[in-house]
Image: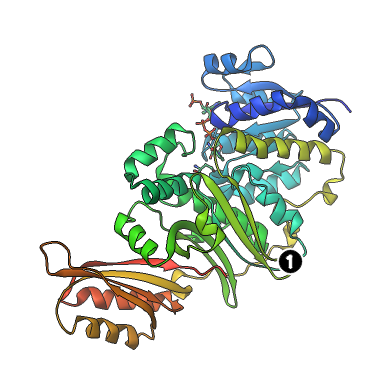
Amino acid sequence: MKPINVGLLGIGTVGGGTFRVLARNREEIARRAGCEIAMKMVADKDLDKARRLVGKSATVTADANEVVGHPDIDIVVELIGGTGVAKELILKAIANGKHVVTANKALLAQHGNEIFAAAQKKDVMVAFEAAVGGGIPIIKSLREGLTANRIEWIAGIINGTCNFILSEMREKGASFADVLKEAQARGYAEADPTFDIEGVDAAHKLTIMAAIGFGIPMQFKSVHVEGISRLAQQDIRYAGELGYRVKLLGIAKRKEKGIELRVHPTLIPERRLIANVEGVMNAILVKGDAVGQAMFYGAGAGAEPTASAIVADLVDVARMLTADPEHRVPHLAFQPDRLSNTPILPMGEVETRYYLRMCVQDKPGVLADISRILADLSISIEAMVQKEPHPGEEQVDIIMLTHLTVEKNVDAAIARIEKLPVVVGKVTRIRLEELN
Ligand code: NDP
Ligand code: HSE
């Protein structure tokens, strides 16, 4: 079979890794793909950097349009990122009949429906294994390995930067700002790191997994998103004392009335395997009715782990080139005309457990007032701890863990508790998942 020619857009962290992995494992990859996969063109704004990395092995250009329009290019690998020029280039590549491989979860979560429809019209493939979980083959697993199952829920640590920050804060007491700088230096963070720490990147990835898991269109705007930037060191410590770890989780759960889609810091019992996933590692738990729980674990970011997924997609596309388009694996696992319109539940309807921390004046009757409010709203307390008074003050932290409760009741309880004259400041609420 003749070689497959690849054009790379953006030779930054992941693009550089992809170039290296393709070159290093060239022979092995050709044996798997059944043909050589050759990086023929590379486009990057920084021509000197691109020339330095590529040498004479590929044509280098500063104009990505040259690559997407070039008649010799079969597959375009988009590793520029963002939803602006990357979207234009991908749509142009598709219009020109090129297959596309991308790691761009932001683009797919927001414009995936449009991109897949365009690709379907032109009978080309858009592959995106690297968009979720870095090197973990979670897209392939959800789309192919688990097709027998009715997926019940997916819960994942899907942002390496946040997990790295939380691990370093818990293990070394490191400051948030210092660890974020290190994550950026290691190439884990997004171009705009607020996407990482505010949970947006995880929400992009959750949108993609939910679409594939449940056969629904991409619905990024319906995801409830909370990041880790307001998480206090003392909550990580108190959670530890109670036997829990705090992780940024992306959760997609099928319920009777619809689907919960949420990203937020979450307490997880420390005896769960997923609670012990540290550093830049990612893990995704999938609960299917037949398989039960399956956990997928691996490096969630970084040059070569992500390149591993990009190159796997290149091989997949190369293998599928000769397949009749109707018999290829559908982009979102379900046939495009069989996607369902199951509603995404509003956050108030979500049911989970809660960690509540409130700072109160150390006076008689305070607990009774708080308990009354919780009881009025049918919120049952599973555990409660009162900490030592703050040094030199007559205020104490009270921590409560609730049983399963509907979010709107917790919202109402928090609003009433914060109005009590004995309560100082805001109530901290972190959701808790047993994941069993
Ligand atoms: P980088 O910023 O390291 O790389 C992007 C590259 O594209 C840079 O070299 C940039 O040049 C170049 N570029 C920007 N605009 C253009 C343009 N118009 N034409 C040609 N080249 C351009 O990003 P990453 O490699 O980290 O990320 C790439 C994609 O992969 C993103 O979608 C990201 O979300 C995704 N991803 C990243 C992971 C990671 O671990 N880093 C993991 C999984 C997915 P310059 O630097 O001069 O602007
Ligand atoms: N910024 C992302 C992360 C890169 O930290 O997980 C991998 O998608």
Image x and y of residue 142, in percent: 69, 56
Rendered view: 68 above or below 296: above
Decide if residue 160 is on the left or right side of residue 284: left
Identify the image quadrant of the C terminus. Answer: bottom right
Residue 367 location, quadrant: bottom left
Decide if residue 402 is on the left or right side of residue 295: left
Image x and y of residue 151, in percent: 67, 66
Decide if residue 51 is on the left or right side of residue 383: right
User: What colouring does the structure picture have?
Assistant: rainbow
Rendered view: 69 above or below 403: above
Q: Residue furthest top?
A: 56
Image x and y of residue 186, in percent: 47, 33
Camera sees residue 37: no
Front in this rendered view, residue 136 or 42:
136
Q: What's the residue at 58%, 38% (across, down)?
A: 87
Front in this rendered view, residue 65 or 222:
222
Image x and y of residue 408, in percent: 40, 76
Q: What's the residue at 60%, 44% (across, down)?
A: 131
Disc 1, SS: loop
Rendered view: 242 above or below 161: below
- Write down the residue under mark 1: 149
Instruction: Tell me the kind of residue under disc 1.
Output: Asn
Camera sees residue 418: yes
Q: What's the residue at 57%, 26% (across, down)?
A: 11
Q: How many marks?
A: 1
Q: What's the residue at 37%, 77% (across, down)?
A: 383
Decide if residue 179 is on the left or right side of residue 120: left
Q: Crowdedness of circle 1 by 10 Å Cα count: few (<14), some, many (20+)?
A: some
Identify the image quadrant of the N terminus. Answer: top right
